[in-house]
Image (cartoon, coloured by chain):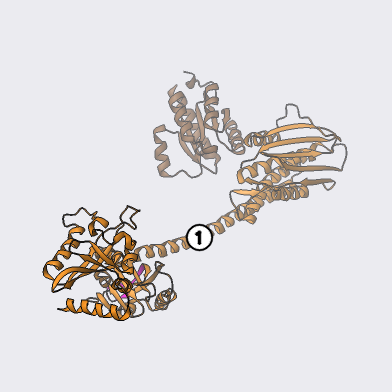
Amino acid sequence: MTGGDPQRPLRVLIVEDEALIAFDLEAQIEECGYEVTDIAHSVQTCQAAARHVRPDVALMDYRLKNGDNGRDAATWLRETLGVPCIFLSGNLDEATRELLAPLDPIAFVGKPLLPPALRAALKKADEARLANG
Amino acid sequence: MSGTRTDAMLDDWTMTLKIGAADLLSSLPRSFAIIDLDMIFLEASDGYLELTGRTREQLIGSHVFERFPDVTSDAASSGDIVRNSFRRVFETGRPDKLDTYYYPIAPSPDDGAPQRRWWRAENRPVFRNGRVVALIHDVEDVTADVIAQRERDVRDRLIESLSDVATWQFHPQSQTVIASAALAEMCELDGETGDVLVAPYLDRVHPDDLERVVSIFAANANAPAGTSVDFDFRVVTPQAGERWFACRSELVRSEPNAPAAFIGLSIDITEAKMREVELTRTITERDRLIEQKEVLLGEVNHRIKNSLQIVSSILKLDASHAHDENMQGRLQAAASRVQAVASVHELIYRAGQVDTVEFGEYLGDLCRAMEDSLPLEIALIHESVPLRVSTDRAISLALLVNELVANSATHAFRDRKDGTIAVRAAVNETRLELSVSDNGDGRPEAPGHRGLGTRIIAAMVSQLEAELRQFRGTQGGHVVHLSVPIDR
């Protein structure tokens, strides 16, 4: 029920292992008027952050440090909390996109990150949240 | 009868020479015994005694088959063979030959265990007054010959059983070879089997290998029997073309001083050789590709470094054109951060190694680049140690050092113009100990002000899993100490 509240801004969890890129994403998200719940850099920190504050959407890097995989984090978010993802990655091939399709991602956004693409994806996530509410 | 004449002659000799018949018999250079009709030893020559390991006293007057009991258990036993021969002589009055037969005897009367012995014998009658009264058992020990022959037989049978293997026996002296059918087939030499001249076979050897093959046999001509002679060479035949043969052979001699012969077999190893050639080619190609990849990676890093350099330059240009002092400072800080990342790529390009960089070298480069952008009055000194770190961590460290130096430069010397900033790196067992210290007037506090520099420092410390401590230096000034785990 809380998901559909139009009075509060969209809540976004950033899962990105490169700290400076995460800062950049945070600045862009806040500029759009949305809220960043936390920055996670691994599957484990993603789970902890999402349990603490449930996001409406996660901005998910596909390749994480120490061999962690964004797909594992996204699967957990989807199955445990029903949170969808926007996938971020420089080079996602067709096979990988097909592999991620069952997770019903909101969008795939390439790197380097173009602000309009990110804005469009976040807008789509916000609309989906309000529609489901 | 010849027997009568022999007796008469013996009598004549002994009378003339005044020596006894027994003395004469014992000295004859043969091994024989005289045995009477009851198969009792009457006399034995020295040779016979030597051959059987017995003394005259032990034999004379005793029964042949009691002295040398038959220990074989066959139906047609060795004892019967000898006994029957004796009987034939006594009954017919004719000499009887015994071809090689087996009859084990104990080496001496005290040593009971009979040993394997083979013999050849001729039993001749001794006549007196036209009647057979005894026989001469003339015997030869052929044990050594029999054993040698058996070994030859085993070898021959083995060669025969390997009929579909290309076997051969090469006799360099006669330039002949005993070739198996399989060898002839392999060499496409129909009919050149059995004992044939070696020339047609040598004609099949690749011209470039012929001299080597011939010299291998020549070099081993005087080697001891049993010497292994192994070699590979190429064969060229009309049908199959060029192929590789592996030869495994052994030097043999029919007698100790006989000329060397080589008995061996040949295997077609063309496929294995081809794989070897193919493998060598693949490895060469792989090495070339790896080299090419390294060149390309170097090129990529060079371009990344150039591009980052351009970005840094753009920011510096912007800074110099900014009228607002605050804006100028921020653009310069941004230029310096980009420069810090660029310096890592510069190093990768120079060192030609992508996954790790030499930290000591890199820290020096970074400090020299930063000193250029600091005010002239501020000196930047550095001490470092050789240490390789991963490229990812090098970038984090570059940004961290850049921020810490920039912090000192901005905040430490507010009330004076000159100062020194020192960057020191040391390595203990598992950690890199890195400090940035200054001789300024104290720590610039920034309460509540979470500037980008502070956030970058926090993020990099966390990313490196480092520990950060700040304290006042023993001679004043501010020290930031970082302890970073080394990824070994």
Q: Amino acid at mark 1?
A: Asp
Disc 1 element: helix
Residue visible at 59% across and 33% down?
A: A26
The answer to whether residue A75 is seen in the rendering is: yes
B241 part of magenta stretch:
yes
The answer to whether residue B68 is seen in the rendering is: no
Q: Quadrant of the N terminus of chain B?
A: bottom left
Q: B27 above or below B452? A: below
Query: What x and y, as percent, mark residue B159?
Result: 27, 65
Q: Colour of chain A?
A: brown
Q: Colour of chain B?
A: orange
Please tell me which residue lies in front, A59 or B456.
B456
Q: Is residue A90 left or right of residue B332?
A: left
Q: Which residue is mark 1?
A: B287
Q: Is residue B272 left or right of residue B337?
A: left
Which of the chains bears the disc numbered 1?
B
Query: What x and y, as percent, mark residue B376?
Result: 83, 48
Q: What range is drawn magenta here?
A: B236-246
Q: Quadrant of the C terminus of chain B?
A: top right
Q: In this view, which residue lies farthest toward the right?
A: B416
A26 part of magenta stretch:
no
Which of the 4 image quarters holds residue B442? Answer: top right
Please tell me which residue lies in front, B416 or B442.
B442
